[in-house]
Amino acid sequence: MTKRSPFKYIKTSPEIIRLAVMLYVRFPLSLRNVEDLLHERGVAISHETVRFWWHRFTAQHSLEVRDVTKILVRPRRSPAIRASRAAVGQRGIVDPDQSLVISGNTGRAGI
């Protein structure tokens, strides 16, 4: 089954809808301010249209932003780095002749 486009029955360009939703969500602007900004760019819409788009496409917009943030902020580690780290609760190898100094007390590491 193919994925349906959320913009299927809307005549306006998806880029304009994304821009309007991003302006309203990202910046502290009112619906009428977003309408004015888009009007300056040559897009004639009403503030009610921006409200409709915001209500309909905010979830999709937040998912897209979250996906981009994952890519930009948290790059995935390579398998070699993950394999080099010890698992939780896994003991390391300790030389029995090694001495430890903890809080000024010297003791042997080997058991």
Image: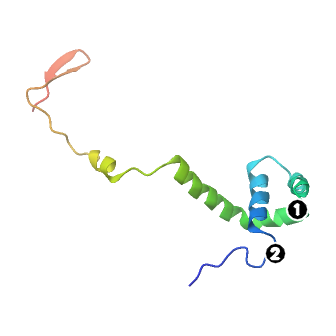
Identify the residue at image location x=53%, y=53%: 70
- In percent of width and height, residue 31 lies at 86, 56
Q: Residue at x 89, y 59 (%)?
A: 42
Rendered-image quadrant of the C terminus: top left
Which of the 4 quarters of the picture holds residue 15?
bottom right
Q: Secondary structure at mark 2?
A: loop
Q: Nearer the viewer, residue 63 or 13?
A: 13
Q: Nearer the viewer, residue 106 or 51?
A: 51
Query: Residue 43: which numbered mark, if any?
Result: 1
> Residue at (33%, 49%) from the top-left corner?
82
- Check disc 1: other Cα within 10 Å, few if <14, some if 14-19, many if 20+: few
Q: Amino acid at mark 1?
A: Val
Q: Nearer the viewer, residue 109 or 3?
A: 3
Q: Earlier in the sequence, mark 2 or mark 1?
A: 2
Mark 1 element type: loop
Judged left or right of residue 35, residue 99 is left
Image quadrant where one finds the N terminus? bottom right
At 19% from the left edge and 40% from the top edge, which residue is drawn? 92
- Left or right side of 1 for 25: right
Q: Which mark is residue 11?
A: 2
Badge 2 density bin: few <14, some 14–19, many ≥20, Cα 10 Å: few
Residue 74 location, x and y as percent? 49, 48
Q: Residue furthest top?
A: 104
Where is residue 3? Give x, y as percent. 60, 78
Q: Amino acid at mark 2?
A: Lys
